[in-house]
Amino acid sequence: TDFTGRTAVVTGGASGIGFALAKRFLEEGARVVIADIEQSAIESAVAELTALGEVRGIRTDVRDLDQVQALADATLEAFGRVDIVCNNAGVETGGTFLNITEQAWRWVMDVNFFGILNGCRVFLPILEANGGGHIVNTASVAAFNSGTATMTPYCASKFAVLGMSESLEVELRTTGSPVGVSLLAPGPVKTRMIEAERNRPADVPPATEPGRVAMMEKLAATTAEVGLDPAEVADQVLHAIRTNQFFVLTHPDMAMAGVQRRLDWMKTGVPPAARRAGS
Ligand code: NAI
C-alpha cells in the first residue's frame, strides 16, 4: 500500500500510540486527522506534526456516535476521502471488583468498546463506498489474558473489542468487502495510559480504593522497564495494513501465554493463580 494521498483518521491520536501512528502516516505521505477528547493535547500534537504534512485535529468524544459521525463529515469535508481508520482511543481504571462503580464500568466500556464500535459503524460504509480501506481496532494483550486481578472492566472491554473485530473481519472476508480489519493488541508500551484518569469524566466518581495507586505505580514501573516505544508499534501497524494482517501482536509471547493459560484452564478445570496488573 502506498499511503501517499491517503487519509488516515486516528482516535486517541493526541498521545501515545495514536500520536505515533499519526506521525508515521504523515511521514508516509498520508493526510491525517487526529481525533481526541483532550483539546490542549490535540493542539500540541498538531503543532508538533504540522511540518510533516497535512494534519488536522478534531475534538471528538468517541463515546458519542453523533460526534464520531461529525468527525467523519469533517474529515470528508477537509480531505474528500477516508482510507484508514485507527480506532485507538482507550482508557484504563482498576481496582478490586466491588470498588469499581457502575459509572466507572460504563466509562471504560463506552470508550474502549463502544468508541471502537462507533468508529466501525460510521466509517465502514465510507471505506466501502471508496472501494477499499483498512480499519485498525486497538485492543490489548489483556484481550488474551483473562484472570488479571483488579482489571475487570479493562479486560472485559478489550475482550469485547477482540470478539467484535474477529467476527467483523470474518464477515467482511466472507462477503467480499474491500475493507480490511486489523486488531492491534499491544503489551506494555511507553505512553500516558497510566495517567488515563486525566480523562475520567466529571460524572464518574473518582477511584478511592486504598492500594490502587500502588497497583498503578507497579504497572507504570513494568511499562518503564519492558515497554516498547510507540514508534515501534506504529511501524508494526503500518506493516499490518500493507499486508492485510489481522493480528498485530507487539508482545506475541505474552499474548500466546495468555491464550495458553486459558486453554490449560479449560482442559484441566484448574483455575490459574491470580495475577495482578503489572505483574
Ligand atoms: P494514551 O493515554 O497515551 O493515549 C490515549 C488517548 O486516548 C489520549 O490522547 C486520550 O486523550 C484519548 N482518549 C481518552 N478518552 C477518549 C475519548 N472518550 N474520546 C476520544 N479520545 C479519548 O495511551 P495509549 O497507551 O497510547 O493508548 C492507546 C490505546 O492502546 C488504548 O486503547 C489502550 O487501551 C491501548 N493499549 C495500551 C497499552 C500500553 O501499555 N500503553 C497496552 C495495551 C493496550
Image (spheres, grey):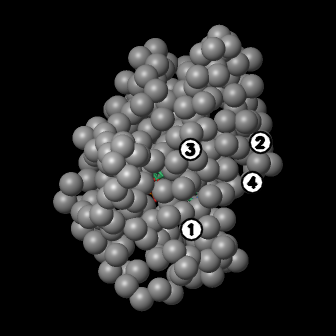
Q: Is residue 5 placed above or below 20 in the rendered structure?
A: above
* Residue nearest the viewer, comparing 64 with 141: 141
> Dots 1 and 3: beta carbons under 8 Å?
no
Which residue is situated farthest in the right direction here? 66
Q: Quadrant of the C terminus?
A: bottom left
The residue carrying mark 2 has its beta carbon less than 8 Å from ligand 1: no
Between circles 3 and 4, the one closer to the viewer is: 3
For label 3, the SS is helix
What residue type is disc 2 on?
Answer: Gln
Q: Secondary structure at mark 1?
A: helix
Q: What's the CA distance linking mark 2 and mark 3? A: 20 Å
User: Disc 1 or 2, which lies upstream in sequence?
Assistant: 2
Residue 69 marker:
2
Query: Quick one: 207 or 86, which is closer to the camera?
Result: 207
- Element at badge 4? loop
* Mark 3, residue position: 161
Q: Earlier in the sequence, mark 1 or mark 3?
A: 3
Q: Are the two marked residues, 2 and 3, in contact with CB atoms closer than 8 angstroms?
A: no
Q: Earlier in the sequence, mark 2 or mark 3?
A: 2
Eyeballing the image, is 202 above or below 105? below
Residue picked out by circle 1: 199
In the rendered structure, find residue 22 and report the number of the disc placed on it.
none
Does the residue tagged 1 have its C-beta within 8 Å of any atom of ligand 1? yes
At x 74%, y 54%, the residue is 64
In the picture as drawn, the residue positioned furthest to the left comes out as 225
Q: Position of residue 113 (x, y in %)?
A: 61, 50
Residue 32 spot, x, y in % from top left: 55, 35
Q: Residue at x 58, y 22 (%)?
A: 170
> Which labelled disc corresponds to residue 64?
4
